[in-house]
Amino acid sequence: MMESVISFLISVTPFLIDGLLLGFVFGVAAMGLTLIWGVMDVINLAHGPIISLAMFGVYLLTVTLGWGNPYIALIVVAALALPIGMGIYYIAVNRVIDAPHLSSLLATYSVNMMLMGVMNAVFGGAPRNIEYSLGTIQIGESITIPTARLVAAVAAAGIATALYFFLYRTRIGRYIRAVTDNRDAAELVGVPSTRILALSFGIGTLLAAFAGGLIATIFPFTIFEGSKYELKSFVIGVLGGLGNPIGSLFGGLILGVIEGLVPMFLETSWTPVIEFTLFVLILLVRPTGLFGGKS
Amino acid sequence: MAILEVHEVTSGYGEVQILWGVNLSLQQGQLTALVGANGAGKTTLLRTIMGLIKPWSGRILFEGQDVSKLPPHKKADMGLVLVPEGRQLFTSMTVLENLEMGATPRRARPYFKRNLELVFEMFPRLKERMHQKAGTMSGGERQMLAVARGLMAHPKVLMIDEMSLGLAPVLVLQLFESLNKLREVGITTLLVEQNVHLALSVTDYAYVMAHGKVELEGPSEQIAQDPHVQKAYLGI
């Protein structure tokens, strides 16, 4: 009996570690979505294509332009995502920000369609893969971790920590929290709220792009890859509390573990079924998320 | 000298016109009351002055400069500050963070420490609750925090909307006493009040609004003696 428990634990551990490592990356992708939702009550349906675009951006710099190192490309892509996100805000979102939710939903959906259209025309539907191996790390006899996943997890945790310090320890971060809390009041104390909304959209886009770039260092991808992570981001957002970017990191870890463990017991195709069952259950039982969110 | 002048301002929400040509001016260093029945347009006037609602026509001058089209944050930067109705605090932030947010305007930052001491002296309660979340405080404490946050902006003109609404009489008196302090430090104040009697007893000058217009204005003592005002607002 004891022996079978131990052997079970040993067989589970690699899947668990794998899931946790990926969970950090899922978490950062979801942070991008939930930050934007929290600050301006906009569900950014362009989230997925932005993730895909970042994957192709990293691919373009690393492979096509021959930079070789995807991590340098990732930093460049993330830095570009900030002004791109701010641009999307001013062009597509700002004018409908006070309109009913459906307007901003349609506006970001239009951005989604445009980005997908452009990517389809330029890159086509064929899968890409960034050949860049960091090798593996061996722990004990049975656990082998691809180093790229470890690096991705550490980078994701790093940017999540940076976001936390930015929001809670800097003046601009405090402005973002103030606009999230009460936009009129923020404007009345002297916060240029439109610029803060644009900046928040830019940061949300940067986080999505960062996650996309990290995923591109781990898995092959097509232009449709981002939409998978958009769906995951919704589940994670609800798990961690929509509008609570820090909760997203924990939500991401939970989802990562589920994705790691499900294939041990069921066909992989059951994963989304389980995830979205969880999504509906949490909405029913605890709509503010496991870690509290914006009511 | 008039620090804030409102000339023939009209505005409203959507297609509904609320203000029908309002004229008002605040004299430097004075305490002015704006009274009137519910729905007279007092809050709409304050929101229009700040730019939360755009004026449809007319002009708003602050220190002689036309600010009619400026957004609220620009006005706050210049020293025109509103303590809004319903307090509008940052409920997820602590008392101290709310006060820090109040000091957002660049011109307020050098005075941060001094103003913080001033508001803690006026409202010792806030000092005790410094690290408490604003959303968990009582109505009176929230009102104190709203006024204190306004003061942290180092305002030249402070407009306070319905300071006494829903507060216990003891607290109301305490808050009104603190208004004298504002006069001492030279802040021009516009007080929108439903407690007409109290408002007229502490202010220098008063405006009475009805149906989106200024119906009557004059020194507060004189307004308090007006037969129509006595009948309509003071129950005498």
Image (cartoon, rainbow, N blue to C red):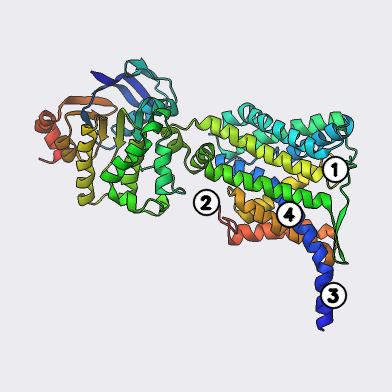
The residue positioned 66% from the left and 52% from the top of the image is A249
Q: Earlier in the sequence, mark 2 or mark 3?
A: 3
Q: Residues within 10 Å of mark 3 (few under 14, many from 20)?
A: few
CA–CA distance in space, label 1 to label 4:
18 Å
Are dots 2 and 3 on a single chain? yes
Query: In the picture, residue A72 is in which quadrant?
Result: top right
Q: Which of marks 1 and 4 is nearer the N terminus?
A: 4
Q: Residues within 10 Å of mark 1 (few under 14, many from 20)?
A: many
Which mark is in front, 1 or 4?
A: 4
Secondary structure beneath label 2 = loop
Relative placement, left or right, of B192 versus A274 is left
Residue B215 x/y as whole percent? 21, 25
Are dots 1 and 4 on a single chain? yes
Task: Output the chain of dot 2.
Answer: A
Question: Label 1 sits on what residue type?
Answer: Phe
The residue tagged 4 is A23
**Looking at the image, how many numbered discs can be counted on the residues?**
4
Task: Output the chain of dot 3.
Answer: A
Q: How crowded is mark 2: few (under 14 residues within 10 Å), some or many (20 or more)?
A: few
Are dots 2 and 4 on a single chain? yes
The residue tagged 3 is A7
CA–CA distance in space, label 1 to label 3:
34 Å
Residue A169 in sight in this render: yes
The residue tagged 1 is A221
Q: Which of marks 2 and 4 is nearer the N terminus?
A: 4
